[in-house]
Amino acid sequence: MARSGARRQRSLHQRTRPAIWLAQHLASARDALCRLLRTPLPTAMTIAVIGISLALPAALYVLTGNLRLMVSNWDETAAISLFLRQEVDDATAATLAERLRERPELEAVRLIGREQALREFRELGGFEGAFDQLEDNPLPALLAIYPRNTQPEDLERLSAALLELPEADFARMDSLWLQRLRAILALSQRAVFIFAALLGLGVLLIVGNTIRLEILNRRIDIEIMELVGATAAFVRRPFLYAGAWYGLLGGLGAWLLVTLLLSLLQGPVSRLAELYGASFRLAGLDALALLLVVGGSVLLGLTGSWIAVERHLRGAHPV
Amino acid sequence: MVEFERVFKRYPERGEALSDISLRIAPGELVFLTGHSGAGKSTLLRLIGLLERPSRGQIRIGGRDLASLKRGRIPYHRREVGMIFQDHRLLPDRSVFDNVALPLEVMGVGHKEIGRRVRAALDQVGLLARERATPVALSGGEQQRVGIARAVVARPPLVVADEPTGNLDPDLSREIFELFERFHYVGVTLIIATHDLGLVAKMPYRTLTLSEGRLVNDSGGW
């Protein structure tokens, strides 16, 4: 029988093996999708849960990404702004700047003289008329100090030293709060990863449980398929595809949610930026992040269903 | 085609279901397997389809020792054994056509070929007109014929049937047996478990009788 059986199989398999394999996969994928669509409400709910779970870390990722983008625009900010006394004129300020430039711990010193400050202030808008009424320039000269070393303690020390200068009035450490902001950003990025890991685990469990119920529902189908000679792979395939579909649709749902969220935030953010005389457009999920969200979601769905299939199809074989 | 050599099957919960069964069935034979319920008929057929493994002894189907068959090869073995059950074992949410197509689908047969073979099988059992129906819309006899069509659609050399007429009235039972006879004429080996002794007596075929797990009578053969 072995030989006649083999001949029989060959006559049935008129197509080549890869073609059969591909056709069976396509059929399984289509079949799994049709099954999901046959129960639209439960399917939609599962997809929504996956979508929301993944949208949360994705949105956080996008928002911290935007913040980082904003902060990187400020990289030129001087570490210390040293405001000079009102009576120090531009010429004295310039000599002071020259002197400071010779100090080895300083990378650069930029002088913004009183005249220049006034000009810039005028250009900033909103104050055109106000300054014309003043008899003399109320703005002090400013030295923007860029030290080599930007450790917070060093900055504190340097700023104290600079304030000792007779010409100095007060110093503002611009970069210090920028550093704090960066630290907070790093923290929130870490938080995004933790959230993503936890919620990813959640997605895994959701898909695993959904597939487990599906397997229990179709116990009889599975048994019958095995009776007529379905291989384990053939039986598993539709469930694995169902998991992948859940993942794909959930991932796209997450992307949709994030896009929606950003479009809701874009208006207020632009208004806020306008108030600071800047323009800022929120960046959406970039291609890589999109790939990560959707691809990761598919992978999570596949893994979840694989776990369910491994656990619950094992016991189905009588032998 | 089928050889049992000193086969035992013991279940932990209900003891010995088959003890010391030795038999040989030649290719192309039609054999009835009778005995009261619980005599071990179903167990014997389940061993042939590798739904279960024997506790002891050797079973050879088509010259192949089933004990040497690894788990992963079992599906391929089942493709060469058409199985028919008393409760039909049809998929309730699929059409008659899809039910019969299942063994071919599992084997990866192409669409066109499936269509041809399924219709041929349905034609043989007289259900060509009902291919779009779902099993629940069919009578018990029709459902059983769908089960038979499914068992033979891939043209397995061996077909086993477990009480195929258990729930049917005598007229329908005779029809089913005539159907089996037709497969017998084209060279299929058939083993049919039944307790319909009246029908068996009217047909000129070998009969194996089981009682309490033992083979107590063999009307003919080797």
Image (cartoon, coloured by chain):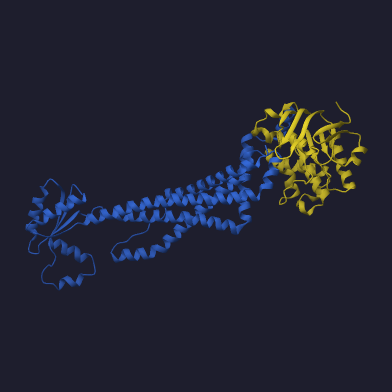
Q: Quadrant of residue A233?
A: top right
Q: Quadrant of residue A22?
A: top right
* Pick the front one: B160 or A172: B160
Q: Residue visible at 77% across and 32% down?
A: B19
**In the image, residue A75 above or below residue A140:** above
**Residue farthest to the right, as pictured:** B202
Q: In the shown orientation, is residue B198 left or right of residue A314?
A: right
Q: Which quadrant of the rendered structure holds the C terminus of chain B?
A: top right
**In the image, residue B161 above or below residue A263:** above
* Pick the front one: A112 or A208: A208
- Relative image position of residue A184 (x, y in whole percent): 31, 54
| Chain blue in the figure, letter | A
Q: In the shown orientation, is residue A267 left or right of residue B28?
A: left
Q: Which quadrant of the rendered structure holds the N terminus of chain B?
A: top right
Q: Quadrant of residue B110?
A: top right
- Relative image position of residue A202 (x, y in whole percent): 49, 52
Q: Judge whether residue A54 can be spotted in this image.
A: yes
Q: In the shown orientation, is residue A241 left or right of residue B27?
A: left
| Chain yellow in the figure, letter | B
**Residue farthest to the bottom, as pictured:** A133
- Relative image position of residue A17 (x, y in whole percent): 63, 34
